[in-house]
């Protein structure tokens, strides 16, 4: 498939290095199904050797998409030995700091010797490839593309004075409110500005940044880009923030709910169809998303301990509304929506692929829009008012419930992004992990 092998010309690296002559290392990056990064670092000379060769790939262990936190025995029937091949997409190349750059990779299993690999489609478990497949199908069937922009929400935490005690939880600040400048007037504000500067230096445009609802909580909004480029960029921007914060003596955590007393953090996605579409197409796309929202929650917010489900953030009802942030899907204009049931513990490639797939299914089947425009919080109105709006279903109460529903009925999503990718996702996320997440979550996320 052309879109999964089109990884930029050999001149991309040379052009990049002309503008960034101090770069010494390229970080080859893959996002696992746990939403964590796997990174292998190559010196510039080795990258150039690879590009000049006929096979510009990097060979790694054969479990690079798994993430390594579940029970390996569940894969015993399929996974054997060999190697994964990482295919760098040089169009995604971005500088992380003065000496380091990163390139996002697709994962091929052609050399793994796994029992179930289709050599005609060795990318079938790669989420980045799944997004490319979804984008290709939408372009072929609807003749549209997508622009996507993300909002990064995170906490900047200070070190504790005691050695070995990690990072301090924020304390309540009198008068702190959304977009308050109160806690940005010192070192934290300097750090946040440095994070935004570093993102801009990498070539990722920042729309704005500000303090969020809780003390030490920050937001950086990224400008829209074509869907794949935007998804690459948000992964790279998060890593840039983490590295920059560490240099300034802070720890950046994107964990969805790190503190019970303070606001949660999301990864809201703004997605628009290009060129602009008619109301009928927009409504069918929205219907496809709304009909599948209960299973999309399990893909976008897959960790039980960190679930943002509920009236505080994503809303508890399956509802949409024009410029309404109290519902899971906010309509901004025809064909342009903000998707709010997403957090940083997801694989963002799979998330965006799944939402696009849901919308495509809605358009191709001409699914009618069952809910009316909700202009307030559905949790604060009467049952009769909700019935009038067609708001009759709650979102799943837990992430596990959403994943179980997805396991029971994939609602056509696998027909767009691939059955083996969805099989693999469910197998990984439904396994009983033995990791003590309380100790690792603030570090990993």
Image (cartoon, helix red, strand yellow):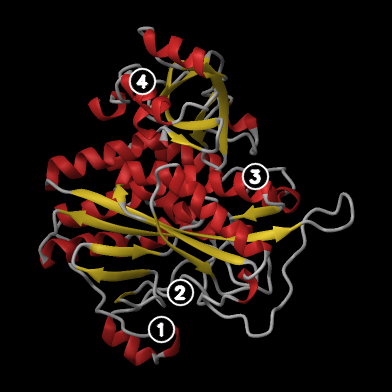
Q: Mark 3 points at which residue?
A: 432
Q: Earlier in the sequence, mark 3 or mark 4?
A: 4
Of residues 19 and 413, which is closer to you in this image? 19
Contact (CB < 8 A) between labels 2 and 1?
A: yes
As drawn, the label of residue 315 is 2
* 326 shown above or below 68: below
Disc 3 crowd, CA 10 A, few/some/many (<14, 14-19, 20+): few
Q: Name the residue under label 4.
A: 118
Q: Distance between the residues labelled 2 and 1?
A: 8 Å
Percent x, y for residue 149?
35, 55
- The image quarter containing residue 122 is top left
Q: Earlier in the sequence, mark 2 or mark 1?
A: 2
Q: Distance between the residues labelled 4 and 2?
A: 41 Å
Contact (CB < 8 A) between labels 4 and 2?
A: no
Circle 4: element type: loop
Tell me which residue sits at (72%, 43%) in the image: 435
Disc 1 crowd, CA 10 A, few/some/many (<14, 14-19, 20+): some
Q: Mark 1 points at which residue?
A: 377
């Amino acid at each position: 498939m052309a879109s999964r092998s089109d990884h930029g010309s050999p001149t991309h690296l040379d052009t990049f290095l002309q503008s960034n002559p101090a770069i010494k290392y390229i970080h080859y990056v893959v996002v696992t199904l746990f939403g964590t990064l796997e990174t292998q670092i190559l010196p510039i000379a080795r990258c150039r050797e690879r590009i000049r060769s006929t096979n510009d790939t990097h060979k790694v262990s054969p479990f690079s998409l798994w993430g390594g936190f579940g029970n390996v025995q569940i894969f015993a029937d399929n996974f054997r030995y060999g190697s994964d091949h990482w295919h760098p997409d040089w169009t995604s190349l971005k500088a992380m700091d003065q000496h380091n750059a990163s390139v996002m990779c697709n994962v091929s299993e052609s050399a793994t010797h796994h029992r179930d690999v289709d050599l005609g489609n060795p990318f079938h478990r790669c989420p980045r490839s799944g997004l490319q497949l979804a984008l290709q199908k939408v372009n072929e069937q609807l003749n549209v593309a997508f622009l996507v922009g993300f909002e990064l929400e995170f906490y900047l935490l200070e070190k504790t004075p005691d050695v070995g005690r990690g990072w301090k939880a924020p304390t309540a600040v009198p008068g702190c409110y959304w977009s308050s400048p109160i806690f940005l007037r010192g070192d934290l504000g300097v750090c946040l500005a440095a994070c935004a500067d570093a993102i801009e230096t990498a070539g990722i445009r920042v729309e704005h940044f500000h303090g969020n609802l809780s003390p030490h909580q920050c937001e950086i909004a990224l400008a829209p880009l074509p869907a794949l480029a935007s998804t690459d960029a948000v992964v790279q921007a998060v890593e840039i923030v983490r590295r920059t914060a560490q240099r300034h003596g802070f720890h950046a955590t994107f964990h969805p709910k790190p503190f019970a007393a303070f606001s949660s953090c999301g990864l809201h996605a703004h997605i628009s169809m290009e060129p602009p579409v008619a109301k009928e197409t927009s409504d069918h796309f929205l219907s496809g998303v709304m009909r599948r929202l209960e299973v999309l929650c399990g893909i976008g917010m897959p960790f039980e301990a960190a679930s943002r489900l509920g009236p505080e953030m994503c809303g508890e009802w399956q509802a949409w509304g024009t410029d309404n942030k109290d519902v899971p899907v906010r309509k901004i204009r025809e064909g342009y929506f903000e998707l709010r049931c997403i957090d940083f513990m997801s694989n963002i490639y799979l998330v965006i692929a799944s939402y696009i797939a849901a919308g495509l299914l809605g358009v191709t089947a001409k699914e009618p829009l069952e809910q009316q425009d909700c202009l307030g919080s559905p949790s604060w109105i009467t049952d009769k008012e909700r019935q009038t709006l067609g708001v009759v279903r709650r979102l799943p109460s837990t992430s596990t419930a959403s994943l179980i529903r997805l396991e029971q009925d994939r609602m056509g999503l696998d027909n767009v992004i691939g059955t083996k990718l969805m099989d693999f996702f469910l197998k990984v996320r439904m396994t009983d992990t033995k990791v003590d997440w309380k100790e690792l979550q603030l570090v990993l996320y």
